[in-house]
């Protein structure tokens, strides 16, 4: 007997656009929920965010496809009373509603939590904003990266300009917070029978994701400085090296034992006995000297052979891959969705966890065309 997906029968209404909210919608679709995406008459704006190579004969851009597998779509002009009435009918039988309006806009359209919950007390209304319900600002990932320290920390060095991360990570952080809030609310509803309002902001999600970098300032009073891909408290960790065959690689040496093994593989065992490098705190203090030695030595070696030997001996290291190289590895194949109907290209799953209690969705319907 086939096991059911855990959210089979759950009804999700998605009034959210762009990335964070739609990522949550696809998450539920992958786990069996019925997800109906409500778009304005012009469609989700990401349908127009196109890159070279996007198929001009479809309204499904690569960006839109990143978050909209497994959904149905319907266009409603919620400024019109008839469309609002239709949305109210849909919300009356929904379990979860995803929204990403500026504070106050949902109430103007008659699709706010108080209005919809009055007819459906079991509704879990998940509201995403840029800065919280008290701040009427539109939230865009690049701006949030700048305002919460990420662009500053992502510079190559303190003397280089801040850099935006290449993926909208603040949106993705917020999507995870929204999912966690909804799952908590579903658990609570099982006990109380009542839904609730869940509120998540991009700003709070970004701050929560500062992790050790935020704790550094709170604990020591020292503002973390940009180190490129280096780590503030571990060396060597994250720096990119280029081997003699051109292979780019990184090390993630978290223990003194791993560093000693690395030195043996590099045929420089004396480095591990030097007071400058024998412990991680010493390596952090003498970061520049050690990094220079590693850059020179690794440049003399075959990169693939070095990576093979480090893997054999349990020293964390990896090749620097392009996106295409990463997605074509054998390890990546279970994360890919097979082509479907009008969108004959692969998709990328948002659900990375697995369970013995339910199967992985073998396939999903393609991202919907503009309704």
Image (cartoon, grey):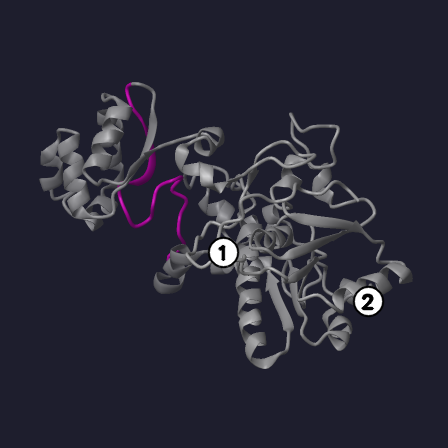
The C terminus appears in which quarter of the rendering? top right
Which residue corresponds to the image point at 77% horizontal and 45% vertical from the top-left?
43
- Say whether residue 329 is magenta: no
The prevailing secondary structure element of the residues shown in magenta is loop
State the image coordinates of residue 72 (x, y, percent, origin top left). Answer: 71, 49
Please state if 253 lies on the left or on the right of 368 as rendered. Answer: left
Looking at the image, the residue that sits furthest to the top is: 245
**Is 213 drawn above or below residue 91 in the view shown?**
above
Residue 104 seen in the figure: no
For the residues labelled 1 and 2, the Cα–Cα distance comes to 44 Å
Mark 1 and mark 2 lie on one chain; the one further toward the N terminus is 1
Nearer the observer, 224 or 67: 67
Residue 6 seen in the figure: yes
State the image coordinates of residue 87 (x, y, percent, origin top left). Answer: 80, 62
- Residue to which mark 1 is pinned: 1
Nearer the observer, 128 or 10: 10
State the image coordinates of residue 354 (x, y, percent, origin top left). Answer: 44, 53
Magenta region: 222-244
- Residue to which mark 2 is pinned: 110
**Is 213 drawn above or below residue 108 in the view shown?**
above
Q: How crowded is mark 2: few (under 14 residues within 10 Å), some or many (20 or more)?
A: some
Which residue corresponds to the image point at 67% horizontal and 61% vertical from the top-left?
11
Instruction: Point out the frontmost of discs 1 and 2.
Output: 1
Which residue corresponds to the image point at 76% horizontal and 77% vertical from the top-left?
118
């Amino acid at each position: 007997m086939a096991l059911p997906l855990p959210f089979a029968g759950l009804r999700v209404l998605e009034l959210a656009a762009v990335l964070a909210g739609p990522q949550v919608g696809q998450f539920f679709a992958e786990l069996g929920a019925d997800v109906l995406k409500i778009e304005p008459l012009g469609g989700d704006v990401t349908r127009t965010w196109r890159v070279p190579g996007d198929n001009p004969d479809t309204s499904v851009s690569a960006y839109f496809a990143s978050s909209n597998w497994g959904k149905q779509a319907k266009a409603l002009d919620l400024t019109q009373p008839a469309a609002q009435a239709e949305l109210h009918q849909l919300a009356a039988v929904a379990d979860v509603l995803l929204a990403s309006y500026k504070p106050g806009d949902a109430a103007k359209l008659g699709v706010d939590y108080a209005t919809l919950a009055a007819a459906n007390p079991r509704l879990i209304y998940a509201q995403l904003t840029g800065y919280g319900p008290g701040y009427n600002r539109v939230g865009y990932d690049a701006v949030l990266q700048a305002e919460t320290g990420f662009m500053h920390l992502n510079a190559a060095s303190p003397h280089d300009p801040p850099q935006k991360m290449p993926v909208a990570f603040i949106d993705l952080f917020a999507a995870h917070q929204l999912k966690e809030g909804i799952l908590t609310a579903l658990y609570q509803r099982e006990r109380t029978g009542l839904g609730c309002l869940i509120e998540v902001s991009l700003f709070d999600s970004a701050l929560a994701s500062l992790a050790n970098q935020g704790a550094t300032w709170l604990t020591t009073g020292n503002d973390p400085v940009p180190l490129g891909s280096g780590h503030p408290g571990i060396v060597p960790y994250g720096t990119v090296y280029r081997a003699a065959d051109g292979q780019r690689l990184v090390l993630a040496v978290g223990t003194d034992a791993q560093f000693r093994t690395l030195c043996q593989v590099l045929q420089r065992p004396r480095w591990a006995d030097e007071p400058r490098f024998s412990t991680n705190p010493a390596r952090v203090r003498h970061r520049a000297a050690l990094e220079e030695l590693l850059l020179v030595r690794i440049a003399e070696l075959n990169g693939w052979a070095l990576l093979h030997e480090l893997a054999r001996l349990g020293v964390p290291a990896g090749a620097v891959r392009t996106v295409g190289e990463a997605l074509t590895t054998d390890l990546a194949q279970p994360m890919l969705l097979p082509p479907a109907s009008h969108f004959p290209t692969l998709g990328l799953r948002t659900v990375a966890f697995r369970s013995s209690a339910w199967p992985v969705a073998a396939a999903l319907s393609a991202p919907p065309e503009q309704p």
